[in-house]
Structures are given as C-alpha cells and as structure tokens.
Amino acid sequence: FSKSEKKELLKHFSNIDRSVFAIITPRQVDRGALMSRYSRTDKNMRKVFLDEFLKNQNRGEEFYTKVLLEYGDDSVAELGGAQIAIEGLSNIAVKKIEDRRIGLSYLEKSSRYVSWDKKINGKYKFYHDPDIIKSRYADDYLQACNFDFELYKKNIEPMLKLIRENDPVDNYKFKDHDGNEKSFHKLVNIDSIKSAQRIYNAATKAKALDALRSLLPASTLTNVGITGNGRAFEYLLSILLSSNLTEERNLALAMKGQLDTTIKSFVGRANDKYGKVLQKYLHDIRKNSIKLGKKYAKGKPVQGNTVKLVESDTESSALDSVISALIYEQSSGIQFLQIKKNIKKISKRQKAQIINDFAQIRKNRRHRPPRAFEMTYYTFDLVTNYGMFRDFHRHRALTLERQLLSTDHGYHTPNEIIKLGIEKEFVDCMKRTKNVFQKIRVKMPEQAQYIVNFAYNYPYYMKLNLREATHLIELRTVPQGHIDYRKVAQKMYRSINQKHPSLSKIIKFVDLNQYELERFESEKRTEEKRKKI
C-alpha cells in the first residue's frame, strides 16, 4: 500500500499489515458488504475496500440491493448488526419479541431489582390497548390494572419490613476488615458495616419484589435492549407485522424506522411485497392452527402447577446414542452406526461408568457437557405462574411453544403474601382480573391477555436435549434463583433422574437445597467485586 492508502485504511481497519484485524469502517452496510466479498474475490479485504468502496460511498447499499433483492441470498444479511432499545412496551409484546431464538440477544428490565410503583404523568406504567380502550370494557380494564398497581405499591414497605423481621440481618455472616466472617452485630469496621447493610438491603428488597411481582398485570410496561443481525431483525419485523395486536404492529413500524437509520439495506424486505407474502403465510399458519384446536383441543384446563415429563428415550437407547457420539469425533473414520453397534455390546454398568467418568471431569457448571449429550431429548408439559415462565423463556437452545395467557389455570399465591396478611386483598385482585378477562376474551382473546396477573398459571411445553437440560437445571437451581423456578427446575431434574439414572449423573451441579434469603450469597459476591474496583 502507498503512504496515502495506508493513512486512509487506518480509518477503516485496526491495522494494515496483519492477518487478523478489526473492521472499524463506520457504516454497518459497508462492513457487511466487505465481508460478503470474501466469497467472490481472491483479493484481501483492505484491497477490496480501496478498489471498490473508497471512491463509491454507495457501494455497500448497491451490493446488498443486488444480492438480497436480485439473488435472495439471505445469509449475507447476517453480516451487519444493530443495537436497538425499546422502552415502554408491554410484557405481552416483549415476550413475542423474545420468542425469536437465533440472531438476536436481549436484556430486559428486571422485576426483581426495579419496582413498578412510580407513576408517569399521574399514571401507572401499564399498556392502554387501543382496542380495549375503544370498547365498553375500557373502565373495567383500567380499574383492574390500577387496582393491581395500588396493591403492589402500598405493600412494598410492609413486605420489606416483614422479610427483615422474619429473617433479620444477624442471621447472616459478613466479611470484616480482617477477612473473617462475622455476624452483623460483631462487625467493627465502618466500611464493613456499610457493605453488610448494602448486601442485606439488596437481598431483602429482591425477595420483597419477587413476592409482589405476582400482582403485576401482563400490560406492565418494561424496557428491552436488543442486539442482532439484519436477517434476524428482518424476520422479527415480519412476525410483529403479522400480529393481531396493535401494539406489536406499531412496534414493528417504529423499529423499522429506527433500523433504517443504521441497517436499512438489511431489513428492506420486512414489509415489501416479499414481506407481505410472509406475513400472510404466518397469518394462515395461525388461522389453520386455531381451526385444528377447535376440533381436537378438548378437555378441561389443568389447575395449579404442573411439571410432567411426557416424552423421552429409554435409557438404554439414550446411553448408546450419547456414548457413540462421545467416541465419534476421535474415532478415525469409523462411521457412527458401526460405533453404536459396538457400544450396544457392552454392559449397562460399563456404560454408566463412562458417563460417570465424563461427569467427574466437570469442575463447575460452566464446564458444559460435550455435544454428545444433545443426542437424547426430553419433552416437559409445564404449567407455572406467568412470572416464573418469563424466566424460563430466556432459554432459547430448545423448543418452547406456549398458549395464550388466560385465567383458566388458577393462580399461585406466594407464601409471603399470606404471611403479610393480605391474602384476602390478593384473592380479590385475582377475582377482579378473572371477571374482566372473561368479558374481554369473548371478542378479543389476544387483547384480553394484557389484564392477566403474573400470578396466574400459564401452560407451555419445552423439548430440550440433555446438554441444554443440564445448563437449565444447574443455572435455575442456584441459591440466588427465584424460589418458583428453583422448584420447577428441581422437579425437572428428579424426573430426568428417575427416567435416566445413569445419564443424569452429568447434571452434577444441581442444587436441591432450599434457602430463605435467596439473593444473599450472590449479593455478597457482588459486594466483594465492588470493593476491588
């Protein structure tokens, strides 16, 4: 490169003479187009940039218009990314967005660390669905949602007081300045005392908000940040545009407008003639499924909490598949079927020992089992409260299908609600919700979801392989986890262990204990890290 070329290249690449470099050219469309050119040229990227992009500011857009619209090569749309923030969307809409599993990553406002007691312009933060507001049920809807928030707000301080009285700070030990763990009243260093107070206050606040979040309706407004590639964003927009909910369609239009400012070439087909065909397809899929449901989905809705393993392989078959897969990668050209024939000949005891040997290699839950453990699957039929479902919904390396949110399956009353003495008010709140929900669902079953509280039970199924089951169960049984999903994950483990006692040895870091102040140890670790900063 000439001296002037080198100077120009350093504005767009992290170096000009190494085989590994970062692409720092400002526009996403140019970054994606440059990477895409790898498949059609033997030039290095920096040479391509000088020859094709430097003097043509529209080169990136021209490339994507040609490739996406003329050739339909969707994969190149994965080479450009964007980060987008959405504020003030309902819990119904955010779950629809987070249903997308590939190409998008999310971070959502927590109901555990942030309270929803504040008003904006004199109004609590819940979604006013225009279809409901235009209907004769508007007043009922608004009154029910406001009642939820009033009950939530007025019990935050009483709930905190109850939790701190029942589980006082002196029940726990904290690190003092000398490095020793001591009860709170024995701490002597002022910084250690302040640190202990921060830990305890954060842990008790999380427990209080955990209990009270069951009152919140699905219309509660939240915030979410999304990082993703163009292809995934384009499909998400098509999904939202095909929705029956005004909120989701409006969100798609708003997102499209903002994505056009950064990756316009990547999402151009979301609502063009091709996008509209896809939207119709998605609508027809939904229409056909509803038709089939009316014919075959008969029976009474299950009441209460359910964790049921409904499909799995026999352990003999699962062991043969998993062990064969463990061997395959290192087997010098021997086919999988031949390996499996050989494995079938060894004893069950030997097979169990092989699994146990691999389990012993794992030293913590972040040591993921090898991919071989993806060879056997489990299908769970689940009914849990909606608040808990929102946590399980974050797991995406599995198949999860869910139904419309309703009041048909009863609700879960947290023990803290009973201990606080507000069970009657809680029940009244749930009854009010059910009455209004039943009215709205007759004409607007999807819009009716907005009024349903997090406490109400929600049906869904999950099909996951043993590797993902290990990750989910070990993560969701950690001491700092919410009590609701800890119990469900523990039941899932026991079901797998009963069905596959040998294979389940790989789920080595499941925690089957119960804890009073779940967030305590986690807050202690956070405080220790804070001190080191």
Image (cartoon, rainbow, N blue to C red):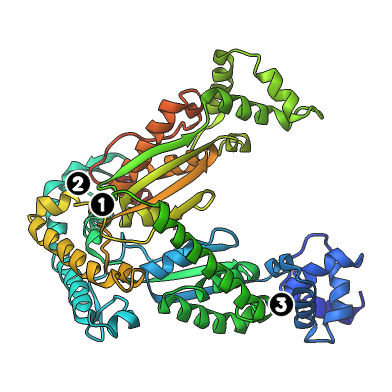
Pick the residue in front: 80 or 136.
Answer: 136
Percent x, y of residue 218: 31, 67
> Of the residues shown, which amino acid type is indicated by label 1?
Ala
Please tell me the numbered disc located at residue 184.
Answer: 2
What amino acid is labelled 3 in the image? Val
Give neighbour class at mark 1: few <14, some 14-19, many 20+ (Cα, 10 Å): many
Q: CA distance from mark 3 to mark 2?
A: 57 Å
Query: What type is the residue that disc 2 sits on?
Result: Phe
**Among the 4 quarters of the image, the one containing residue 26:** bottom right
In 3D space, how far apart are the residues under numbered discs 1 and 3 (Cα atoms)?
A: 50 Å
Q: Is residue 387 left or right of residue 152?
A: right
Near-viewer residue (452 or 530): 452
In percent of the image, x 41 and y 26: which residue is there? 498
In the image, 35 versus 277, the foreground residue is: 277
Q: Is residue 15 visible?
A: no
The image shows residue 37, relative to residue 505, as above or below, that is below
Q: Are marks 3 and 2 in contact (CB under 8 Å)?
A: no
Separation of marks 1 and 2 at Cα, in angstroms? 7 Å
In this picture, residue 427 sits left or right of residue 362 = left
Q: Within 10 Å of the Cα at label 3, are there few (<14), some (14-19), or many (20+) other Cα atoms?
A: many
Closer to the N terminus: mark 1 or mark 2? 2
Give the quarter of the image for residue 445: bottom left
Query: Foreground mark, 1 or 3?
Result: 3
Quadrant in which the N terminus is drawn? bottom right
Q: Which of the labelled discs sits on residue 196, or is there none? A: 1
Q: Are marks 1 and 2 in contact (CB under 8 Å)?
A: yes
Residue named by callout 3 = 29
Relative image position of residue 531 (x, y in whole percent)? 38, 55
Towards the viewer: 468 or 411: 411
Q: N-terminal of the two: label 3 or label 2?
A: 3
